[in-house]
Amino acid sequence: MISTLKGRGAINRIGVVNENSLHAALKELYRAPGSQCEVKIGNYIVDIVRDDLLIEIQTSNFGSIRRKLAKLLEHKRLRLVYPLASEKIIIVYDKEGEYVRYQRKSPKKNTFYDIVRPVNVGFPTKSRVSLSIDYPRYSCEMNYLLAIQR
């Protein structure tokens, strides 16, 4: 069962109101003319439906949607969009948030293998045939307030 959500219902608000800016930007990037956004398929809400392709954008923990992806793969082709931070700049401000105390690059490096391992373990081989993965790269700044000053 496929239905497009309209209005400000509770289900629609789950997909849109709690959406972060990265998720919203990717949704706009992947949306094409004629595609539908926030579509209910069975018990799940899918970000974008384009013809026979479902597009699901995941900007947080992959494990939280494993069951959803497995169920959707039973019916349609699925593209998982899983952005990876290629660079994170950590900026620490004084406790008033006025001055930068220091900034540095995060040592953590995300790679394609951070996605492949959960996918290979999480889905049977038959399901993986209908799954494609996009992993757009982005840079970001992470801002923190210094809690204790010396």
Image (spheres, rainbow, N blue to C red):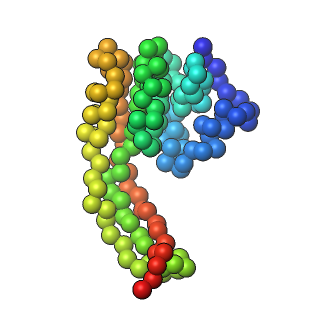
> Image quadrant for the N terminus?
top right
Outermost residue on the bottom side: it is: 150
Image position of 116 with respect to 42: above or below: below
Judging depth in this view, the residue of 62 and 16 nearest the camera is: 62
Position of 84 with respect to 46 (left or right) is: left
Q: Position of residue 122 (x, y in %)?
A: 34, 26
**Residue appearing at x 42%, y 18% in the figure:** 73
> Image quadrant for the C terminus?
bottom left
Judging depth in this view, the residue of 122 and 42 nearest the camera is: 122
Judging depth in this view, the residue of 71 and 29 nearest the camera is: 71
Q: Position of residue 60 (x, y in %)?
A: 44, 43
How many numbered marks appear? 0
**Residue appearing at x 33%, y 70% in the figure:** 104
**Residue appearing at x 31%, y 65% in the figure:** 105
Q: Position of residue 112 (x, y in %)?
A: 27, 40
Residue 88 visible somewhere in the drawing: yes
**Residue appearing at x 37%, y 64% in the figure:** 89
Q: Position of residue 147 (x, y in %)?
A: 48, 75
Position of 126 with respect to 58 (left or right) is: left
Image position of 133 with respect to 73: above or below: below
Residue 36 visible somewhere in the drawing: no
Image position of 65 with respect to 94: above or below: above
